[in-house]
């Protein structure tokens, strides 16, 4: 076994030696390729030559590298000495280009384009010489080089005058457009015709260019027909509306029926781009049948064209919508739905891709992605009010598509859909949650680009965010947001995580403060203290400050600040203390000066005693910003503490970097009040006053909400009490009817006893005593103020019973005459109630009426007690 190990190690060692030998063989050609002394002499140029002579010498006998450098520097030579450059250098360049390689050709194309565009050439003959070189190299055997020269010519046409174009370009163009020329030459002629048409009047275009256009549209090569068809848009805009209808439209109709799919596709794209130039009659009679036939043919047999069709579909529908009938409108909408489901099968409400060849499956996925791109336009086409019945299932299918690219495109346009739906935004709440919980991080990345706008519209009934908009509760929104953040945090794409945390700063306008406090704040602290990416930590600190800024509960704000001090300012890790200083920088921008000084400044200055030099170093850099938050003379004690910290750093600091930073900071502090302009200071003060007013408004809103909640609680208790009283009144009325029936069955002896009691009480009431009167008044006051919720039944029922009994007794005594009867044990109560009632009537007049809320209960109690005594 040991021998085996030795053998393996030896073989590995020999393998490394062989690799080193291979490297030595690689290095040998490099050494041989070094320039010899003879080659160096050839590359050496006489220093006494001027720029023009040096350029001519290098173009004549120099190496390819030297020639290329002269061609690249040609615009500078033209600027310095245009006459000599065109007389001596440009002819040499023309000779060199005959045998030059592709790199030198491309460099020459770029140099001549710079010369033509920068108005360096002032003489017509110079322009002629350059254009001759450009036109000569259009037919280069290398297609890349020929395309580069063609782009040079097309770009130069914009800068050239009309006469130059007519003489130098149009004259040779007629010969290059003939069938006898090569296909690349005819293709170049098509593009030149489209570019030149915008430079001349419609009469010139109709007379000189239209014959060539017709000839190229009927070329035998489909490539030429397709290229010329795409230039018909420029031709149409050059000749005007009347000639477009008479000349261009028939050519487009013929090309749309071409046997080549690329020609038909070019005709379709050109028709869409020219829709605004056709009148309603042409759209109805010509364009609609043509487009309908094209769509049907593509859907059945030409999958290659479906991608372009689906990409242009939204523009097509909007261009023709004004001329559509209801039937045509419905046909285009149904065709769009078919495109959205192309290559899919729906089973149990889920979209699954059908088994197709890979190439065909990719084409279908591209079609669905283009449909997702056009979905906002189709919502507008179908009318947002009909979204639920017409397009909701289609949109749900796109959001659940098995292809990531389709879902990503749907997520990119989700904010547009939400904006269009307006008050019906709740239709897509489920799809919003689906995209937030998508398995692909690409989909989440696309959604969070406009997440702030999406959430604000989705939770405010589509009316936009604001203090007056009513928040709508989106089911499962908070768990979906939490899951999205966790997914971004667990991935390696920290920029997505940073961007998501930045978008979470809108949550105070989307969800309640309690949801933020219990579901997101602890997560922000965890990111600040445990995440390893500094931009993510800083963004989490910013979001945490935003949450603190807009929290409306004083207790929660105090808990957040205390946690910041405990975990960051006084954290065991110096990294956390550095993040506290980052948070202080954010708080300076976000809060008012008074709020920052009250809650953050002292704790930041205490870090001057931090044992880690990095923390003190960062604090030194922050001292000018901390000084800017101190307002004099109100914060004079804070200024003294800051100066004390500076003195401590100057006297005790041992780290050289911190000492150098402190000295530099002291100079900045001395210049702060002197160098700052007044208008900037005034603007900053106004902004700080605005922040302070907003913070005061938040406190007032908190107090108002607390008062409203307390008033609501009292109202609920009062309503419950009223409900209980009404139930008690109903039961009392039942007792009253029972007592009345019992009174009718009483005997004559009972009647005589009742008359005797009433007579006795009347005789005693004519001589009331003062203590009893005071007591009765006190009893009435307690009775009128109402009973407390916590008092027992024994203290409530006698007062109500006495008062109601006295009231009933007054009514009975005034309506009938009674004879004296012997008194009973209940006689003093009846006397006290009657006396107090009579005094109250004499002194206060209308105060004898009882409260309406307790009328039913009191009457029921009085009747019940009377019947019981009877």
Image (cartoon, rainbow, N blue to C red):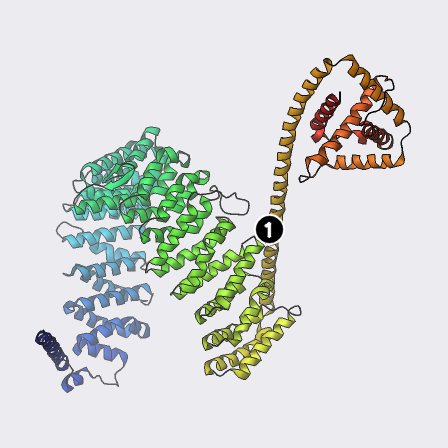
The C terminus, quarter of image: top right
For image coordinates 28% across by 53% down, the residue present is 195
In front of the other: 189 or 175: 189
- Coordinates of residue 675 in the picture (x, y in percent): 58, 74
Q: For residue 303, which quarter of the picture?
A: top left
Q: Residue at x 55, y 47 (%)?
A: 467
In the displayed structure, would residue 561 be above or below residue 26? above
> Closest to the observer: 565 or 284?
565
Q: How many marks?
A: 1
Q: Is 443 rendered above or below residue 869?
A: below
Residue 692 place in picture, x, y as percent: 60, 59
Q: Is residue 222 left or right of residue 838?
A: left
Q: Position of residue 18 (x, y in %)?
A: 10, 77
Residue at screen point 27% across, 79% down: 51
Please determine whether, in this image, residue 851 is positioned above or below residue 183. Answer: above
- Residue at the location (17% across, 47% down)? 358
Q: Residues within 10 Å of mark 1 (few under 14, many from 20)?
A: some
* Mark 1 residue element: helix
Residue carrying label 1: 702
Q: Is residue 112 visible?
A: yes
Q: Is residue 277 left or right of residue 526?
A: left
Q: Is residue 10 above or below residue 629?
A: below
What percent of the width, then of the height, locates residue 174?
Answer: 20, 52
């Amino acid at each position: 076994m040991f021998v085996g190990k030795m053998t393996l190690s030896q073989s590995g060692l020999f393998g490394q030696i062989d690799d080193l030998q291979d490297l030595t063989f690689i290095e040998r050609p490099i050494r041989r390729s070094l320039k010899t002394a003879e080659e160096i002499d050839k590359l050496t140029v006489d220093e006494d030559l001027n720029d023009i002579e040096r350029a001519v010498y290098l173009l004549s006998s120099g190496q390819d590298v030297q020639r290329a450098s002269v061609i690249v520097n040609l615009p500078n030579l033209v600027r310095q000495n245009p006459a000599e450059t065109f007389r001596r250098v440009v002819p040499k360049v023309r000779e060199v280009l005959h045998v030059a390689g592709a790199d030198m050709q491309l460099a020459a194309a770029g140099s001549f384009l710079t010369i033509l565009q920068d108005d360096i050439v002032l003489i017509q003959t110079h322009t002629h010489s350059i254009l001759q070189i450009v036109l000569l190299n259009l037919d280069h055997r290398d297609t890349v080089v020929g395309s580069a020269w063609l782009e040079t010519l097309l770009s130069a046409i914009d800068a050239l005058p009309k006469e130059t174009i007519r003489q130098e370009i149009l004259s040779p163009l007629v010969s290059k457009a003939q069938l006898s020329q090569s296909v690349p030459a005819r293709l170049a002629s098509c593009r030149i015709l489209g570019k030149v048409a915008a430079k001349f009047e419609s009469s010139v275009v109709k007379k000189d260019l239209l014959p060539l256009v017709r000839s190229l549209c009927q070329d035998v090569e489909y490539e030429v027909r397709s290229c010329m068809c795409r230039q018909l848009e420029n031709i149409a805009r050059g000749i005007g509306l009347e000639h477009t209808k008479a000349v261009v439209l028939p050519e487009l109709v013929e090309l749309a029926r071409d046997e080549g799919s690329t020609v038909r596709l070019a005709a379709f794209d050109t028709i869409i781009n020219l829709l605004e130039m056709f009148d309603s009659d042409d759209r109805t009679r010509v364009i609609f049948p043509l487009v309908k036939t094209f769509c049907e043919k593509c859907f059945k047999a030409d999958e290659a064209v479906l991608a372009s069709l689906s990409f242009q579909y939204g523009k097509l529908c909007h261009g023709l919508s004004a001329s559509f009938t209801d039937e045509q409108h419905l046909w285009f909408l149904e065709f769009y739905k078919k495109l959205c489901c192309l290559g899919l099968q729906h089973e149990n409400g889920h979209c699954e891709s059908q088994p197709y060849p890979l190439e065909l499956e990719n084409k279908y996925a591209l079609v669905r992605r283009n449909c997702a791109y056009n979905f906002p336009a189709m919502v507008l086409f179908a009318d947002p009010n009909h979204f639920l019945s017409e397009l909701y299932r289609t949109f749900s299918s796109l959001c659940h598509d098995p292809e990531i690219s389709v879902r990503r495109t749907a997520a990119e346009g989700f904010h547009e859909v939400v904006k269009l739906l307006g008050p019906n935004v709740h239709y897509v709440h489920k799809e919003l949650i689906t995209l937030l919980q998508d398995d692909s991080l690409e989909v989440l990345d696309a959604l969070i680009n406009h997440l702030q706008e999406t959430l604000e519209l989705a939770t405010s009934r589509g009316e936009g965010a604001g203090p007056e908009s009513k928040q709508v509760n989106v089911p499962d929104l908070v768990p979906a947001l939490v899951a999205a953040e966790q997914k971004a945090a667990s991935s390696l794409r920290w920029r997505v995580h940073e961007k998501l945390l930045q978008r979470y700063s809108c949550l105070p306008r989307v969800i309640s403060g309690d949801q933020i406090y219990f579901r997101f704040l602890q997560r922000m602290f965890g990111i600040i203290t445990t995440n390893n990416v500094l931009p993510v930590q800083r963004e989490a600190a910013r979001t945490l400050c935003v949450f603190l800024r807009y929290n409306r509960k004083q207790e929660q704000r105090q808990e957040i600040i205390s946690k910041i001090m405990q975990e960051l300012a006084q954290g065991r890790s110096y990294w956390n203390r550095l993040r506290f200083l980052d948070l202080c920088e954010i708080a300076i921008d976000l809060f008012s000066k008074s709020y920052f000084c009250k809650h953050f400044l002292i704790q930041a200055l205490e870090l001057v005693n931090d044992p880690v030099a990095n923390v003190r170093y960062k604090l030194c850099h922050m001292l000018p910003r901390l000084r800017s938050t101190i307002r004099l003379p109100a914060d004079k004690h804070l200024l003294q503490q800051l100066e004390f910290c500076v003195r401590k750093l100057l006297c005790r600091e041992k780290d050289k970097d911190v000492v150098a930073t402190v000295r530099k900071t002291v100079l900045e502090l001395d210049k702060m009040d002197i160098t700052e302009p007044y208008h900037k200071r005034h603007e900053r003060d106004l902004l700080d006053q605005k922040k302070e007013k907003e913070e005061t408004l938040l406190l007032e809103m908190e107090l108002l909400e607390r008062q409203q909640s307390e008033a609501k609680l009292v109202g609920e208790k009062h309503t419950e009490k009223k409900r209980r009283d009404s139930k008690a009144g109903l039961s009392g009325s039942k007792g009253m009817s029972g007592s009345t029936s019992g009174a009718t069955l009483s005997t004559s002896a009972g009647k005589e006893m009742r008359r005797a009691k009433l007579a006795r009480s009347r005789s005693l009431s004519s001589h009331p005593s003062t203590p009893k009167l005071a007591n009765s008044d006190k009893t009435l006051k307690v009775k009128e103020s109402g009973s407390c919720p916590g008092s027992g039944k024994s203290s409530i029922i006698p007062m109500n019973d006495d008062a109601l009994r006295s009231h009933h007794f007054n009514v009975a005594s005034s309506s009938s005459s009674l004879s004296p009867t012997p008194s009973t044990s209940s006689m003093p109560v009846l006397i006290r109630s009657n006396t107090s009632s009579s005094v109250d009537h004499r002194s206060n007049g209308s105060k004898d009426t009882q409260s309406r809320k307790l009328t039913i209960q009191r009457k029921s109690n009085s009747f019940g007690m009377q019947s019981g005594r009877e």
